[in-house]
């Protein structure tokens, strides 16, 4: 587990197996079933739970894929922490602004995370 702050809020990053990630996601969805058919169809490289301030990354991913997945999940974290309109559709200019504004913040967290590995 790794702890970081985004906009003053503490978040945690965990590496977990597919089975663990699916069990967490199923329990969060209210099913509580270990073998939820819908969940078993999907492969989660990573998943972000904004209300819990937790990010889960598939522990079995190759290092380069794990890095890209963490960047992806941290982008969700950034949007929730700084923009807060998750249901909004973003045009190209807005996406470019999100990338430009979040790049240094996300890169610092990712670099710190992988420095310890």
Image (cartoon, rainbow, N blue to C red):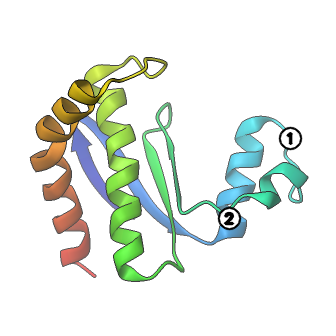
Residue to which mark 2 is pinned: 20
Q: Tell me the element at label 1.
A: loop
First in sequence: mark 1 or mark 2? 2
Indicate which disc residue 21 carries: none
Q: Tell me the element at label 2.
A: helix
- Residue 57's place in the image compared with 39, above or below, is below
**Quadrant of the frame with the N terminus:** bottom left
Q: Residue at x 78, y 53 (%)?
A: 39
Q: Residue at x 23, y 43 (%)?
A: 5
Task: Quadrant for residue 69, please give it.
Answer: bottom left
Residue 43 is left or right of residue 68, and the answer is: right
Residue 72 visible from this viewpoint: yes
Q: Residue at x 44, y 22 (%)?
A: 86
- Residue 72's place in the image compared with 100, above or below, is below
Residue to which mark 1 is pinned: 31
Image coordinates for residue 79, horizontal then vertical, percent: 33, 30
């Amino acid at each position: 587990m790794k702890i970081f702050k985004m906009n003053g809020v503490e978040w945690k990053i965990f590496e977990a197996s597919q089975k663990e990630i699916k069990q967490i996601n199923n329990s969060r969805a209210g099913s509580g079933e270990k073998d939820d058919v819908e969940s078993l169809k999907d492969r989660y490289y990573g998943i972000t739970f904004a209300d819990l301030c937790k990010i889960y990354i598939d522990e079995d991913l190759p290092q380069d894929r794990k890095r890209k997945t963490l960047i992806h999940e941290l982008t969700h974290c950034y949007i929730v922490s700084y923009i807060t309109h998750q249901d909004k559709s973003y045009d190209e200019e807005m996406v470019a602004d999100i990338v430009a504004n979040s790049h240094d913040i996300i890169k610092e967290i990712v670099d710190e995370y992988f420095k310890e590995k």
